[in-house]
Image (spheres, helix red, strand yellow):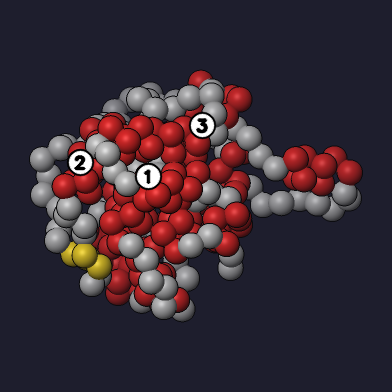
Amino acid sequence: MNRRALMQGLGILAVNLKRRSGNPSPAAKLFQTSMQPAPANAPLPSSVAGVRIIDSKIAKDAMELSRSVSPPYLFNHVMRTYLYGSLVGRALGASFDEEIFFLACILHDLGLTNQFAGDMPFEIQGAEAAKHFLDERAYPKNSTEMVWDGIAMHASAIGQHKRPEIALVGEGAGADVIGPDFSQIKKADSEAIVQAFPRLKFKDAFVKTCADVVQKHPRGAARSFMRDVGERYVPGFHPRNFCDLIAQAPFEE
């Protein structure tokens, strides 16, 4: 299964959220908690599933930024993206700069946060926010460009043809959103990743966040013109909806 190709549905998310009265259920309370800002002082493991959590100064600063603007479920997602992507890279025998890859992963969803969402596609919003963050800290230009590409291309088929620091962002995000390829990632490693960074009702929370961004910034909900043409002029062309793929992901929530 090409997870990156399926991830391209991000630009057309839609959701019908129902309001409910009465006391919230335990699941609803967990969902509400998952949408609150992440605590900045929660300790992180030094490694998960054999993957080291990068602890350089710039990596710690990036984690602090991501935590400060992201709800807990989203921060946990970007951490799982790094871990899954690292394991995919190992399975493929890829050589990559771990710090650059970590930065691209930890910052890849800034465009979905209240602070950085805008009228450009969320991937571009996030890439620009990350570039500004890195430029302020005099991070090397060529490394910053790789981080930008990894974020901007993580939901695009283009990214899979780029160098590992870029391509693996989409691989990691895809594994976390719609499910890992267990020929590349051991189930025990996937369980360890989810235990270290719980999903916190990710499926519902992620779709709601994306829908909120589309509602506020509809011009950013772009998609391929080829899909538009196919839906209008090609009989039987009915691509799967990304929301369905999220709902069918093999994670218990």
How far apart are labels 2 and 3 at the CA level? 29 Å
| Side of 197 relative to 166 (left or right) | left
Instruction: Using the image, determine if residue 36 lies above or below residue 184.
Output: above
Looking at the image, which is closer to me, 173 or 211? 173
Asked whether residue 103 is in view, the answer is: yes
Q: Which residue is mark 1?
A: 141
> Callout 2: 10 Å neighbours few (<14), some, many (20+)?
some
Q: In x, y percent, where is residue 215?
A: 54, 23
* Residue 169: quadrant of the picture: bottom left
| Side of 97 relative to 59 (left or right) | right
Mark linked to residue 211: 3
Q: In x, y percent, where is residue 34?
A: 29, 38
> Callout 3: 10 Å neighbours few (<14), some, many (20+)?
many
Instruction: Using the image, determine if residue 204 lies above or below residue 32.
Output: below
Q: Which residue is mark 2?
A: 61
Q: Earlier in the sequence, mark 2 or mark 1?
A: 2
Q: Earlier in the sequence, mark 2 or mark 3?
A: 2
User: Dot 2: what SS?
Assistant: helix
